[in-house]
Image (cartoon, helix red, strand yellow):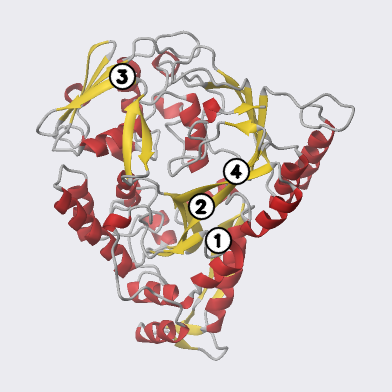
């Protein structure tokens, strides 16, 4: 890691592309450099899981539609993209998309309905193990419970895509899910056996149709995108090049932004709010753009015995966190307001008790019990669950000490600060909480494999339809359910919310959805926070919003 940082420092200090001193040439106006904390997991929509990877993929690959957040209504709307228009039948079981005939892949091959149909089969293939394969479970099924693609997906011509579902589907769910299922190029992938796609991910060419194409990807160092001159989605990127520079250490990223070596600093919490005042005084050329109500932090409590599940497939309760009383106690034990006050400040974060964004205030669940910091209550709940002080002061039950490791990814100062407070809070009530910091991709894999009893993690959970894929008792098919939380009634509520409902029915189901999470605390939901992205003022036409930091990156330009 030190070698990488040293190499990056040398690179940025001496490259003429990023340095501008008196007497030197002005910085280029065709290359935007962005600092990020960690590399992308994949640049393949079939395999990606990290939120920033998804954002970049939306700049490379086509999507059926483009979501847009209507702030006045507090709703997500959908605009044309690869599809010019679409319609749904009255029963909610059929959706028809009419594709724009002008769209082509970056190599000139036409983008057709067959690319979408072919890609859906890949997403559903268990050998690929896509994190989004469950989106397709609403298709018509065969008697052996596999998807009947012949009946579910029609392509009557090259530019018409017709989808059939086994039950009534809400239009906004269809649009959200199938927008997220970005297609890959059939003419590239049909020569690769599906079983080899994941293992050969690094060698498969990244062929897209979006406003950017990949020029170079040096793992753990940088990704360079180049404007795609053939794109009509919506047009070739205005700026010729856009680089994402991997700099794990926050203070190094900040220094590079201040010095002009970076044009923007995004992701991993963005800017530390405590640095904003100094930036305003010393670096007036930097503008702060907040992404509000999109990201939440939480502590994922593993509800099952991860080792038993990996070795035998059995689902048995986790020794510590299989009991909801214990999970509730953990939330009472953590001083969430202290974390906010000490790092983000009260203007940049809001305590929550479910995964739902505060942006959806109209359907927010209100409770008289908000898990305010109360260590005495936490201790009473733990004692009621059988945890009592041992000879060393650490709680124990059946000769097992309440001692576990809290995992977190490297390079995120906000989570590092939160971990310190959490560790201290738990120690005060007799819980031994150790820290485990892992490189980002290792952290993600271990969490997916249920190797952490507890993990300081979060999600970009900006849309209501996305909420419906976070949870699900069949957690093998729900990769975002990293707590392995199972709840039969919540499954039923999620099924309801996937179907066409009246406004009143939707509201009632969303309230029950939140009520269950509030009661069960499968995670200790810490807060939704503002991610404060830093941009040099020379980067123009930037729009960041609830949906994405890179929402209109194809329109960014440099002065």
Q: Earlier in the sequence, mark 2 or mark 4?
A: 4
Q: Which residue is mark 1?
A: 407
- Secondary structure, mark 2, is helix
Q: Residue at x 49, y 27 (%)?
A: 59
Q: Earlier in the sequence, mark 4 or mark 3?
A: 3
Q: Earlier in the sequence, mark 1 or mark 4?
A: 4
Q: Residue at x 57, y 88 (%)?
A: 392
Residue 77 position by quadrant: top left
Task: Judge whether 60 appears above or below 373 on screen.
Answer: above
- Secondary structure, mark 1, is strand
Q: Is residue 237 visible?
A: yes
Q: Give how far apart the Cα atoms at labels 4 and 3 are.
A: 32 Å
Tell me the crowding category of disc 4: few under 14, some 14 to 19, or many 20 or more residues within 10 angstroms, Cα based: many
Q: Which residue is mark 2?
A: 446
Q: Which residue is mark 3?
A: 84
Q: Which residue is mark 4?
A: 266
The C terminus: image quadrant: top right
Q: Tell me, yes or no, whether the two marked residues, 1 and 2, touch with CB atoms within 8 Å.
A: yes
Tell me the crowding category of disc 2: few under 14, some 14 to 19, or many 20 or more residues within 10 angstroms, Cα based: some
| Left or right of 478 in this view: 546 | right
Question: Nearer the viewer's eye, disc 2 or disc 4?
Answer: 4
- Secondary structure, mark 4, is loop
Q: Residue at x 88, y 31 (%)?
A: 22
Q: Depth check: give the residue in front, 196 or 522.
A: 522
- Secondary structure, mark 3, is strand
């Amino acid at each position: 890691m030190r070698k990488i940082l040293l190499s990056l420092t040398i690179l940025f200090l001496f490259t003429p592309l990023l340095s501008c001193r008196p007497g030197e040439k002005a910085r280029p106006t065709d290359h935007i450099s962005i600092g990020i904390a960690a590399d992308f997991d994949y640049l393949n929509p079939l395999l990606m899981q990290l939120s920033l990877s998804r954002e970049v993929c939306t700049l490379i690959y086509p999507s059926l539609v483009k979501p847009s957040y209507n702030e006045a209504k507090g709703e997500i709307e959908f605009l044309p993209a690869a599809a010019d228009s679409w319609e749904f039948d009255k029963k909610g079981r059929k959706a028809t998309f009419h594709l724009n005939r002008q769209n082509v892949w970056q190599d000139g091959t036409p983008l057709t309905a067959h690319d979408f149909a072919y890609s859906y089969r890949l997403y559903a293939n268990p050998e690929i193990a896509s994190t989004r394969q469950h989106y397709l479970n609403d298709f018509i099924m065969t008697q052996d419970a596999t998807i009947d693609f012949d009946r579910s997906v029609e392509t009557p011509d090259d530019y018409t895509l017709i989808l059939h579902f086994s039950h009534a589907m809400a239009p906004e769910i269809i649009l959200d899910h199938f927008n997220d299922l970005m297609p890959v190029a059939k003419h590239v992938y049909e020569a690769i056996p599906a079983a080899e796609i994941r293992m050969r991910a690094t060698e498969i060419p990244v062929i897209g149709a979006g406003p950017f194409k990949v020029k170079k990807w040096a793992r753990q160092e940088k990704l360079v995108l180049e404007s795609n001159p053939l794109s009509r989605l919506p047009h070739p990127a205005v700026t010729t090049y856009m680089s994402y520079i991997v700099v794990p250490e926050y203070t190094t990223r900040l220094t590079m932004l201040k010095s002009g070596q970076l044009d923007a600093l995004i992701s991993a919490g963005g800017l530390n709010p405590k640095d904003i005042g100094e930036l305003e005084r010393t670096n007036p050329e930097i503008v702060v753009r907040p992404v509000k109500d999109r990201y939440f932090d939480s502590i994922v409590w593993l509800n099952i015995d991860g080792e038993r599940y990996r070795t035998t497939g059995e689902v048995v309760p986790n020794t510590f966190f299989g009991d909801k009383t214990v999970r509730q106690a953990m939330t009472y034990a953590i001083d969430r307001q202290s974390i906010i006050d000490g790092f983000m400040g009260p203007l940049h974060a809001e305590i929550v008790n479910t995964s739902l964004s505060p942006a959806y205030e109209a359907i927010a669940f209100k409770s008289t019990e908000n898990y305010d910091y109360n260590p005495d209550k936490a201790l009473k709940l733990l004692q009621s669950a059988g945890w009592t002080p041992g000879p060393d002061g650490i709680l124990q039950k059946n000769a097992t000490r309440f001692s576990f490791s809290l995992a977190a990814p490297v390079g995120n100062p906000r989570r590092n600060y939160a971990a310190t407070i959490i560790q201290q809070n738990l120690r005060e009530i007799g819980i031994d909480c150790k820290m485990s910091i892992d490189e980002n991709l290792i952290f993600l894999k271990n969490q997916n494999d249920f190797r952490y009893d507890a993990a300081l993690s979060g999600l970009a959970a900006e849309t209501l339809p996305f909420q419906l894929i976070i949870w699900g008792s069949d957690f093998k098919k729900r990769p975002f359910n990293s707590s392995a939380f199972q709840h039969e009634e919540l499954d039923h509520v999620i099924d309801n919310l996937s179907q066409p409902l009246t406004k009143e029915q939707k509201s009632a189901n969303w309230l029950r959805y939140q009520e269950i999470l509030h009661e069960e605390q499968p995670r200790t939901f810490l807060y939704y926070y503002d991610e404060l992205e830093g941009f040099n003022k020379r980067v123009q036409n930037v729009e960041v919003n609830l949906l994405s930091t890179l929402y209109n990156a194809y329109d960014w330009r440099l002065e």
